[in-house]
Image (cartoon, grey):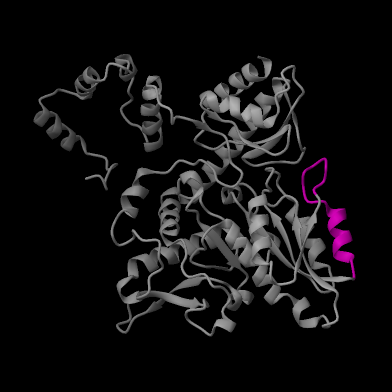
Amino acid sequence: MNNFRYFPASKRDIAKLYRFLGIKDKKELFGKIIGDIPLIDADAFKILPEEMDEEFLNRFFLNVSSGIPAKDKFSVFAGGGIYSHFVPAAIDALISRSEFYTPYTPYQPEVSQGTLFALFEFQSMIAEILGMDVVNASMYDGAESLAEAVLMAMRLSPANRDMPASHKEDIILISGGVNPGCDSVIKTFTGGTGVKIVKIKLNGITGRTDIEDLKQKLASGSARVPAVVVQQPNYFGIIEDLEELERLIKNIAIEPLFIVSSTEPYSFGVINPPGFYGADIFAGEGNSFGNYMNFGGPLLGLFAAKKDYVRQMPGRIAGKTKDGKGRDAYAFILSTREQHIRRGAATSNICTNSSLNAVRAAIYLSLCSKTGFKEIAFLNLKLAHILRDKLLCTGLFEPLYSGDFFNEFSLKIKKNKNGIGAALFIEEMAKRGILAGIAASESAIIISATENNNISEIEKYVLNAKEVLYA
């Protein structure tokens, strides 16, 4: 029954199990188990409550096992695009069913109704979270999704229709707050198109995209600008002012398409989503929804757009229809990949997508509910602010930027007698079982906190940071 790890038993079922095992209650049960595992302190089980939710139960046994030596036990405070979130056991149980267990998109709708239904629900829930009109059935990952968004913008931009052929060059404006990994993939995808990638500076104080620098680059008459790309929250964790950016971009005579990316869509549980600010295209990473960190992959690419641009969207879109007997049925209603239409008319050469991870996300979000989504988002926000405040109170760190942040923030390590910078700090913290963050520069570190980091782990981070930097 490995596929059904967490199905609660009734009191009647529990009584039958006790009779079969010849024991009275759970204390006797755990007493027998502990008898074979002397490393666990029996006193830890004397205060077991009558009821626990799954996350509490999981954390309880992790705390019990904390005294058992293990090389792979880390507190994870490193984000940068992939975040440590709690994954309910029900997801692994359901996704392991043979109907779902494949990364490929289904080719025959008549035998793939379950997967298509799940993908349709995935699209619907992601569209609601993002406030966007249309969502496809996923992309490979967030970086590839953003690169495809840039190519789509180049096809759709009014500049491509209205500017004379004698223009000097095309440029894509990309905020300095976009994840460097995504930036690199964009450059690879656009390498043969002749388009030039131009960076927008970040404001040195707030860490947001610099409005004045963007104005200057948009006002340049020597180039046409098919798209402006920003990340929300940005790579340094700062929440961008999308309202101001959208207003500036939409006031240009030949307006660029406004592309918003995100590597942490949970942020849209506490801040307004990109659709609220009139984003033309959204492309981001959805790994936070029911997927493990998995050493950096496989991931889940999210892609959404205004309905006006649906014909140029890459990937596939699952839709709901009726079969010959009038029953609900699901099928791919749009698939503009090169295998299905003339190669020259294809929007992408994407040959499949991340269906398995997309179905995981659909299951996760359905378990999460709207209320739960907001609660988890607020918990992430609160824990990150608690950690940042405690680190600043040590006097060993100072803020890199002053802008508001969600569950990720950037600090500078102050000069210390041992000359420890960001890279060495991360290395020393790892020796203590803490993945402390990501080095952003010689002295700056990007730190994240999620619902997987409880207060005791935060206290442990602060205590060890003091020891490393004071030593």
Figure check: 440 above or below 360:
above
Q: Which residues are magenta?
A: 202-221
Query: Residue 370 location in percent, x, y?
Result: 50, 51
Query: Residue 232 location in percent, x, y?
Result: 67, 52
Figure check: 367 above or below 56:
below
In this view, the residue in front, 430 or 389, is: 430
Q: Please check the rendered image and state whether residue 61 is part of the magenta-colored stretch, yes or no.
A: no
Query: Residue 205 location in percent, x, y?
Result: 82, 40
In this view, the residue in front, 102 or 113, is: 102
The residue at the point 82 percent across, 46 percent down is: 203
Q: Is residue 71 left or right of residue 242?
A: left
The residue at the point 32 percent across, 14 percent down is: 43
Q: Quadrant of the C terminus?
A: top right
Q: Is residue 266 left or right of residue 97?
A: right
For residue 406, what is the image quadrant? top right
Q: Is residue 105 left or right of residue 255?
A: left
Residue 456 visible, this orientation: yes
Figure check: 306 above or below 439:
below
